[in-house]
Amino acid sequence: MVPQAILSEQVVPDVPPSPATEPEPADLPAVLSAPVQEKPKSRFWQQLSRSRQSFTEGLGDLFLGKKALDAEILEEIETRLILADVGQTTTRALIQELERHISRKQINDADALFEKLRELMIARLQGVQRPRPPLRHRPHVILMCGINGAGKTTTIGKLAHWFQHSGQKVMLAAGDTFRAAAVEQLIAWGARNDIPVIGEPSRGDAASVLFDAVQAARARGTEVLIADTAGRLHTQGGLMDELKKLTRVLDKAEPGAPHEVLLVLDASIGQNALNQARQFHQTVGVTGLVVTKLDGTAKGGIVFAIADALQLPIEFIGVGEALDDLRPFDPVAYVDSLLDRETP
Ligand SMILES: Nc1nc2c(ncn2[C@@H]2O[C@H](COP(=O)(O)OP(=O)(O)OP(=O)(O)O)[C@@H](O)[C@H]2O)c(=O)[nH]1
Ligand SMILES: [Mg+2]
């Protein structure tokens, strides 16, 4: 590529030439007449900017112009991974794999090292990538759970939009009966998506709301029913039992339901997400994860720790508060956005 500075020197002179001397565009060599434009970065790339910074700050300089491999490079990579909250275990494993490739002379320069790091990171995430489960049941019932403020209700709003966009008829169940405001919040998401919400602010029993919602979904031929639940700490035994009870009630209302239990994890809490996930999984059998708030955090590396430690499918990631800020998890796009690379 011709550097921008050289182009501007030749195409945009300080004093504009007179029209008589200005060459027609056709006379210019193709490379000079073409407007020089950097490919616009995707919204997703921009949303991951904080995590990307934490990954690549320093790394770029280290790789730039450096051909020989030395301990300094590996140490810097290790530091970057830890800072981005990849966690000790996964970081160690990645560094050891890089060392193995270096000692076998399979990697000989910094470029190859960077490429191998990318490959290893993608492979780890691909281990928890699954195709979306088919919608074999009508209604396909999804139960959302997670600690307070993880992003459950917001994710439901975005998920409803995603299903609708793929042509499904969706209904929501306001199973967070602890707070009247929670029901109102879900009703607002329902209105935004123009879909029905079962539940009223005054109803106090989550189990009966979910039961009624399944009946209503069946009666209306709804394809996907998404149930909200109250936030609870994984350490609150009574509330965790209540969550288990909700799964039993759903099964009674529609045998086999819930067909998915999605645990919503807030990426910005870093390593604490791991313990939460283990407890929720033990109690209700989580089928998949949604990792939220990846747009506001520098801890995007937590996704690798989650993948390694839990081996649960990461179904979606949340990268903002707008309706279309939920994305099916794509390991290649994710790693390339973190490492500041363009996905081929
Ligand atoms: N930046 C960003 N904010 C998010 C994302 N997901 C949720 N939020 C915000 O996080 C806050 C909490 O979200 P909620 O959806 O209310 O969380 P919740 O898990 O339902 O909370 P409780 O019902 O209180 O347990 C809200 O301000 C959301 O807008 C995300 O992916 N990115
Ligand atoms: Mg909520």
Image (spheres, rainbow, N blue to C red):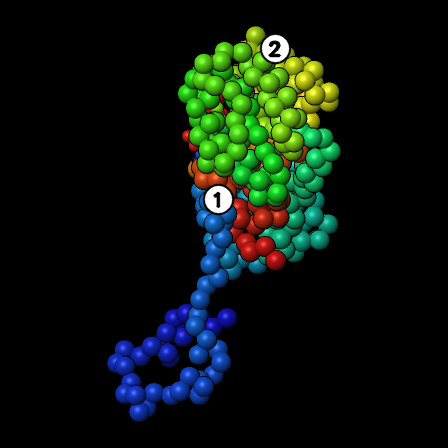
* Residue 168 in the image: above or below residue 254: below
What residue is pinned by disc 2? 241
Q: Amino acid at mark 1?
A: Leu
Label 2: which secondary element: helix
Ligand 1 is within 8 Å of the C-beta of the residue at disc 2 = no
Q: Amino acid at mark 2?
A: Asp
* Residue 197 in the image: above or below residue 63: above
In this view of the protein, can residue 144 be seen by the observer? no
Q: Residue 89's quadrant in the figure?
A: top right
* Residue 172 in the image: above or below residue 176: below
Decide which of 227, 193 is in the foreground and name it: 193
Residue 250 placement, left or right of 193: right
Decide which of 72, 185 is in the foreground and name it: 185
Circle on res. 48: 1
* Earlier sequence position, callout 2 versus callout 1: 1
Q: Residue 124's quadrant in the figure?
A: top right
Decide which of 86, 336 is in the foreground and name it: 336
Q: Residue 256's quadrant in the figure?
A: top right
Residue 115 in the image, given as x and y percentages of width and height: 62, 53
Residue sitting at 46 percent across and 33 percent down? 191
**Count of picture labels:** 2
Q: Residue furthest bottom?
A: 20
